[in-house]
Every structure is written in C-alpha cells, then in structure tokens.
Amino acid sequence: MRQGSVAPEPGDPGVRGERAAGPGRGPSRFGRPPGGGRPGGSGEPGRLMVRFAMRWFRRPLLPAIRLWRRNIQLRIVVTTLLMSLGVVVLLGFVVIGQVRNGLLEAKAKAAQSQAAGGFSVARERANEPVDPGGQDGRGTEDGRTASSSWRSDLVEQLASGGQGAFNVVALSAESEGSGAGANRGPRTSGGVDIASIPEALRTSVGQGTGTYETYIQIMYKNDEHEPEPGLVVGTRLNDADGEPYELYYLFPLAQEEESLNLVRTTLATAGLFVVVLLGAIAWLVVRQIVTPVRMAAGIAERLSAGRLQERMKVTGEDDIARLGEAFNKMAQSLQLKIQQLEELSRMQRRFVSDVSHELRTPLTTVRMAADVIHEARKDFDPITARSAELLGDQLDRFESLLSDLLEISRFDAGAAALEAEPIDLREVVRRVIGGAEPLAERKGSRVRVVGDEQPVVAEADARRVERVLRNLVVNAVEHGEGRDVVVRMAVAGGAVAVAVRDYGVGLKPGEATRVFNRFWRADPARARTTGGTGLGLSIAVEDARLHGGWLQAWGEPGGGSQFRLTLPRTADEPLRGSPIPLEPEDSRQNRERAAVGEPKSSGHLLTSVPAQQASARSTLPAPPAACPSGVDPAALPGSGARVVARGAERPDGPVVQTSPDREDRTRGR
C-alpha cells in the first residue's frame, strides 16, 4: 500500500490507527460500575449472601466433582479434549488470519490497479476540450451545460467497466451547502450512498495529493440492498473547468467474505472432527491402561475381604501383562503364607485344647493325692507341712490356668456361645464384691458401690459378666495399695456400664497398648506372685466382645486406674456410647481443669462412640464433652484380646493413657 493508506478490519468503518477508545468505553464494555466495587460492599450480610450463592451453585456440581476425583480415565480424556480444542482453536486463528490477510492483500492490489487506471482516464478526460454545443447541439453561455454533465458522464464511463465489481463516486471538494450548486453535486453509480465515504478519508483526500484507501461498510440508497464490507480508494483531481473534485472507487468484499466464511466453516468442522477423534483415541488408549488397574484394584479388595483365590487375567507380554503376573505371584504367595499361618494357628489351638484336656486326668490324680497329703500335714514336720500347702496352692493355680486355656481355645476356635437373658447387674456386682471381701480385708481396702439406686438391667450372660467383673474388682483390690475401690454403675440410652476405679500405682506411658495382651506383665523381671494366670483380662475382653460390648481401661502414673465395661441393654444392639466417661472425674487432668476454672468431664453423659464391629481393632474418639484435650478414652478392644489406644503426654505433668493397666499385669484374673 502507498504511504498514508489505512486499512482497518473488514466491516469496521473508519481509518486504521484512529480507533482509540473514547471516554466511557471501558465501563460500557466490561459492564462494571465506576470504582469496580462488589455489590453489597464488604459487610457481613454481603459475605453471607456470597457464601450462600456459592454453596447453592456448588451443590448440583458435587456429583460431577466426585466423579472427576474418582475417575482417572475421565480426567485424562477431558484434559486431552481441552488441550486438543485449545490447539485447534489457536491453529484456526492462525490459518484464518493468514487466509484473510492473503485475500485482502490480493484484493487491495487489484483495487489499486483498477483505481489507478480510472484516475488516469479521469485526468485525460479533464484535459480534453469541452464542446460548447453540448451533446444535443444546443450551446449555452460559458459552456456550463457541457461542464455540468461532464462528471455524470465520467462516473458512468468509469463504472461501466466493472458492473458488480466496483462502483464510482465523484464528490465536490467543497462541503455541501457551500454554494457549489447542483452542477457540482455528488455523482454515484450502482445506487451507492455517499455516506459510505468516511469523513476521515475525505479529509485525507482533500488535504493530500496522493491516493488513499481504507476499509468501509458500503451502504446503498435502496433499502433492499444490504450493507456490505468493502474497500474504497480515492484521490483528488481537477475537472474540465479546473475545479477540484474527489473521485472514489468502492470495491465490495462480499466474495472475499464468503471465501473467509467457507474457510472458517471448514476449519471448524475439521477441528471438531479432530477433537472428537483425539478424544476417542485418548479414551481407547487410557482404557487399555486403566482397565487392568481397575481390575487389580477390585481383585485387591476381594483379596482383603478373604477371597484369596482371586487372580488377574493376563494377556500379552507388555508391561501391563508383567504387572498382572507380578500381582498374581504376590497373591499366590500371600495365599500360601496365610494358609500356612492358619494351619499353624489351628495346630496351636488344637494342641492347647488337647493338652488341656489330656492334663486333666493326671491333674485329677495329683489333686487327689495332694488333698490327702494336705489333710495329713499336721502329722508332718514343719518343712514338709509347708511343702504340702505350697503344693495345694500351685495345684489350684494350675487348675485355673487349664480352665483359662480351655476358655481361650474356645474363643480362638469361635466356639464360644452366649447364653443371654435379662439380668440386673446390681446382683452380679453384689456377688462379686461378696467374693472379694476376704481379699479386701487382707489388703485393708474397702469396696464402695455408686449408682445402684435404680435397676441396671441388660440382656447378658450372667456367668461371663460375673467373670469379667471379678477380674476387674480383684485386680483393683490387689493393686489399690490399701485404698478404697469404687464400683460405679450407670444406664443411659441403649447401654449399661460398670466402671471399677482404684487409686493405686496406675499405669506408665506405653502400657495401655498391651494391657489386654495374654501373659503380659508390666515388669518382666518380677515373678508372678499374685496367683493370677495372666489370661484373666484377655478372657474378659473376649467376653465383652462376645456381648457386643467394650472393655476399656484408663490410668495415670500414681493416680490409679479405671476399667469400664459397657454392654448393650438389648442383645445384638450396636453400641453408640457409654453412660460413664472413661476418664474419672477425680483424675489429675480434671483437677487441673477445675483449678483453672475449666469445666470437668461429665460423669453421666452418654459418651458418643461409633459402633464397634465384631472384628474391629480401632481407636474411636470420644467427644470433647467427655474427653479432655489430648486424651482418647474410647479405645475399643477388638477380637483376640487387643486394645488399640493412644496416650498423650502433657508437657507439664504425667502421661494419661486410654487403656491402662496396673503396674504389674500378673494380676491376670
């Protein structure tokens, strides 16, 4: 293009480089009020409304969000589609821009060539002599008639060479209404409206001597003809009378626009096809990878559920096939190991059961002989008499150990049966305390009962519950260091609870995780002198689990301990809490809270604890109302005499444990 020419985009009137944003254009474009402030300001009501709106809009999207997070195939396919769409759109813009520039450049060159020829013809016509007689042979004074028809003839002559290809407009250099008269009025071809010529272009042509061009919107006087984009080329010339005028060539760009639209449509169709094709390819490729992974995940879940015979289907020799083979080898190895362990466990249980039964016959014989010797001990010397007494005591302990081993073998074999019936736990507690009174008198302790004012009825096996409580009370008396032992009972909701509290040595850090283990002792170097077998609490926790209940422990060093038995009031009803908090109100932590004015843990609130499964080995948290900070008193014992508990050491004092035991777990019964 020549110097001084301007070329905006097709269809945008005006001269390129002169489209500066006017005042107020920004707000009208972006639709924001001045200042850009948020509606509703920064007050609390505005924030609440924004949160409510976000929550309302987000709620229908939650299923899609969950699907997006869980489905890796969907994420990969969607990501591929978005990236492909971005590439296609970018490529489309580049291609359309190149095609548009090529079409416009070719059109501009052709228009400049056509306009240059027309301007040359106009100059030649202006230099020809004017016939005073005019075309009809009638002359006028000063040749005005011939001069008035000169521009019309010129426009018709120039426009006749391009019917439909371009139009010609001749305008006087003077503005309208300046006295130019009708003889020098605008001349147009093809019904073009002179308003199609922008004022900026007219100003450039009127003040310059070269050729100027720009892209415009060609308008027509006839309303039936729609406006269309075009290119205008103009210059300033002199007519036959030597008067200046402006001559413009208007070239429609309808064909170029149709070609550009065809290119756009073709690119859009091809781009959409490519995006869909890439999405399908990505889906197929990812499916080949994700399907074996999903299969492996499903088989792993079934393996964890106990279906050890599950295997992956392996086809081919690629990496996925190698993964499947390795997975199958791992599953086969696990199955063999588990089968070996199960066989060893069965052999162990059978051995314990057989030995326990086989030992009963010789033990009965030894017992009869020992009884005879014990009865005649008064006739022996002191050393032999003492030996007879020790023999009787150890035989009693041996019989208890055999009974406990038989009971443990029943639990391990899953042969333990529950004979549940409605019982009042107050009667069971009275029998247990009556049996422990001689031991309490020897230890200098006193057993107190709290909460027996109202019936505490539950469907339970009286024999098993009594065995559990006997273990707890005897342990509390033996390790209570002569202090009182408190037995608390409570009922709330669908649960009943009995807690046994002592004020003895308590528990050390880390002992809570082993409190219900078989044959566990706090100090392995100490001999078992209390007469217990070391299996009492293991049997007790299995009895509690058989009822669908919990046996839990708490303690602190030097502050005693508390064991809590929680049972459902109705058989087979899941527990959701306990009427008695695991940490007692007089614990060191609660006393510290009271000293600083903080509320204590309520002693009769129903502690919210999730229901325990039959084979669960988990730690379940209690709510803040019944559990102080840093303590997890809801550690639930699982099957096989396990308690998973967590203890938290306070920076300023002792360690509080959730499942504590006495200092020496030799008090097994």
Image (spheres, grey):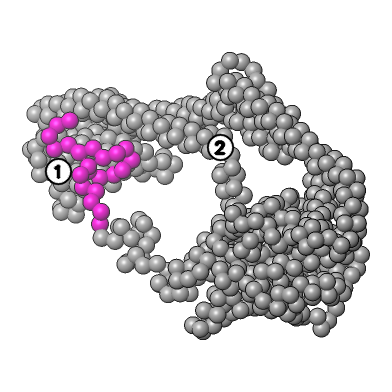
Q: Is residue 452 above or below residue 439?
A: below
Query: Which is closer to the viewer, label 2 or label 1?
Result: 2
Query: What's drawn in magenta, residue-wise?
Result: 1-22
> Would you say residue 7 sits in the magenta stretch?
yes
| Residue depicted at 82% across the width and 38% down the height | 350
Three-letter amino acid code at disc 1?
Answer: Ser
Observer-nearest residue: 210 or 53?
53
Q: Is residue 259 above or below residue 6?
A: above
Task: Report the residue marked by disc 2.
Answer: 72
> Would you say residue 535 sits in the magenta stretch?
no
Task: Report the residue marked by disc 1.
Answer: 204
Observer-nearest residue: 556 or 136?
556
Observer-nearest residue: 637 or 215?
637
Three-letter amino acid code at disc 2?
Answer: Ile
Name the spot of residue 269 as percent of width and height, x first: 49, 29
Does the rendering let one see residue 469? yes
Secondary element at tag 2 = helix
